[in-house]
Image: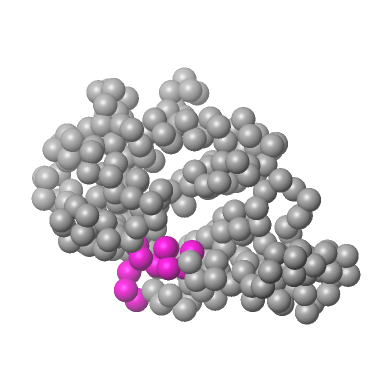
Amino acid sequence: MSSDEIQTLWTDFRQTGDQNARDRLILNYSPLVKYVAGRLGAGLPAHVEESDLVSYGLIGLIGAIERFDPTREIKFETFAISRIRGAIIDELRALDWVPRSVRSRAREIERAIGQLEAQLHRAPTDEEIAKKLDITFDELEESLDEISRSSIVALDELWTVTSTGDQISLIDTLEDPDSIDPQRNLTDIELRQAIAEAISSLPEREKIVVTLYYYEELTLREIGDVLGVTESRVSQLHTKAMLRLRGHLAGGASSSRA
């Protein structure tokens, strides 16, 4: 479908609410749902079907089409991806399939990392994290494996509240910076700076995983090929990086409130 045809559909839908135009827009942008579902599904347990993620994401796409204002200086793709991802994550949260013990341990590791960073002024080693938690190194590794298998630990879940009261995912601040809503511009610049600082403080291999996954959009398996490790090891590195980032950002927020 040409850009002129798509623009005509947007005009028809906005001016008349034509359901046929809406349905054609949904069909045109449906590959976005498949893309987001595939990205999220790569880090989820095997029993989570991608077809389910797609159905959850379609709800987000429909909502995005109905709410999008073509006159705003933002690409629809950027607007829609955020809402598709949000719809999928909201539904997974509602299903509450992540064990409480896993959530609890993830929060404990995240908190320990934040406290150690505040004390050490650098990224703590795995050994230091284990000591802080009063567990062995092997027990920390087992916890990270369990978290990576059953939890959505990603930049998608690093939420913040803007000055206007809206919640956005921090990963949205990494995407298409030229299309940011002007009302959120200052907040997003600060968020991008905070994330860049947090990523730069990661251990080298974790930094590589984050860069290849979120910036180069490689899959976990492809990253494993680059690093010469298994996909499960990449998943663990990704989980560890996300917990470090969450701990780092939480520590920074605590410092700013002090």
Q: Position of residue 232 (x, y in %)?
A: 21, 61
Q: Is residue 56 visible?
A: no
Q: Picture quarter containing residue 147? A: bottom left
Q: Residue at x 75, y 70 (%)?
A: 5
Q: Residue at x 54, y 71 (%)?
A: 31
Q: Which residues are magenta?
A: 36-47
Q: Residue at x 65, y 37 (%)?
A: 184
Please say whether residue 40 is one of the residues in the magenta stretch.
yes
Query: Is 215 situated left or right of 89 in this image?
Result: left
Outermost residue toward the top in this view = 258
Q: Position of residue 91 (x, y in %)?
A: 52, 67
Q: Picture quarter containing residue 29? A: bottom right
Q: Residue at x 71, y 46 (%)?
A: 73
Q: Position of residue 234 (x, y in %)?
A: 24, 55
Please say whether residue 41 is one of the residues in the magenta stretch.
yes
Query: Is 1 situated left or right of 54 in this image?
Result: right
Q: Is residue 75 visible?
A: yes
Quarter of the image where the N terminus is located: bottom right
In the image, residue 184 above or below residue 220:
above
Outermost residue toward the right in this view = 16
Q: Position of residue 58 (x, y in %)?
A: 59, 72
Query: Is 152 situated left or right of 68 in this image?
Result: left
In the image, residue 129 above or below residue 40:
above
